[in-house]
Image: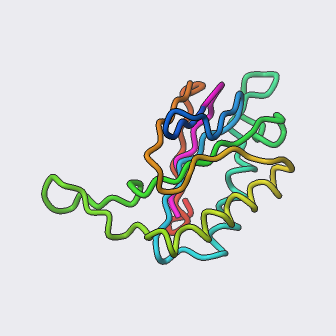
Amino acid sequence: MRAVIQRVTEASVVVEGRVTGAIKTGLLVLLGIEDADNAEDVEWLSSKIVGMRIFDDEEGIMNISVKDTGGNILLVSQFTLHASTRKGNRPSYSRASKGGAAIPLYEAMIQQLEKALGQKIQTGIFGADMKVSLLNDGPVTIVVDTKAKE
């Protein structure tokens, strides 16, 4: 699993002219799932996302997690995070899982994030053409890959 985590002051997802998810202060998480991913990846990554200390404390130091701030999470599936640009100019998405394999892991991620955060999170719609808007705070953008665990 690969996630792009962005600290935001607001973010939203629109599908076919309708807002499907919106948050104020919190994290916009773009999530890519590949066939090698499993429940252990969901558990590790959800814990990492909720516990990541990338919000400023009273001294202006990034030392507080989204859970500590009372903020929320907007989770958006994005298969293009597993694009391969090795050959030519047209990316290959062969590493990205198809819906049948990815949807259960995406839904498990939603459940794990809600459990870890202690509140319902916001989401896009898996596989839909989504319009994502955000106001990146900082900007702070972190890329995490469960296969690299850096």
Foreground residue, 59 or 39?
39
Q: Is residue 76 left or right of residue 25?
A: left
Q: Quadrant of the C terminus?
A: bottom right
Q: Position of residue 38 (x, y in %)?
A: 60, 76
- Total labels: the figure holds 0
Q: What kind of colouring is applied to the model shown? A: rainbow
What residue is shown at x 24% (from left), y 57% (from top)? 91
Q: Is residue 30 left or right of residue 75?
A: left
Furthest-left residue in this view: 88
Which quadrant of the structure image shows residue 24?
top right
Establish if 103 lies above or below 115: below
What residue is shown at x 70% (from left), y 47% (from top)? 52
What residue is shown at x 46% (from left), y 76% (from top)? 35
**13 in the magenta segment:** no
Q: Main secondary structure of the magenta part?
A: strand
Q: Position of residue 122 (x, y in %)?
A: 69, 44
Q: Position of residue 117 (x, y in %)?
A: 81, 50
Foreground residue, 97 or 57?
97
Q: Position of residue 107 (x, y in %)?
A: 66, 64
Q: State the extent of the magenta-drawn residues as a range.
A: 1-11
Furthest-top residue in this view: 59
Q: Is residue 108 left or right of residue 135?
A: right
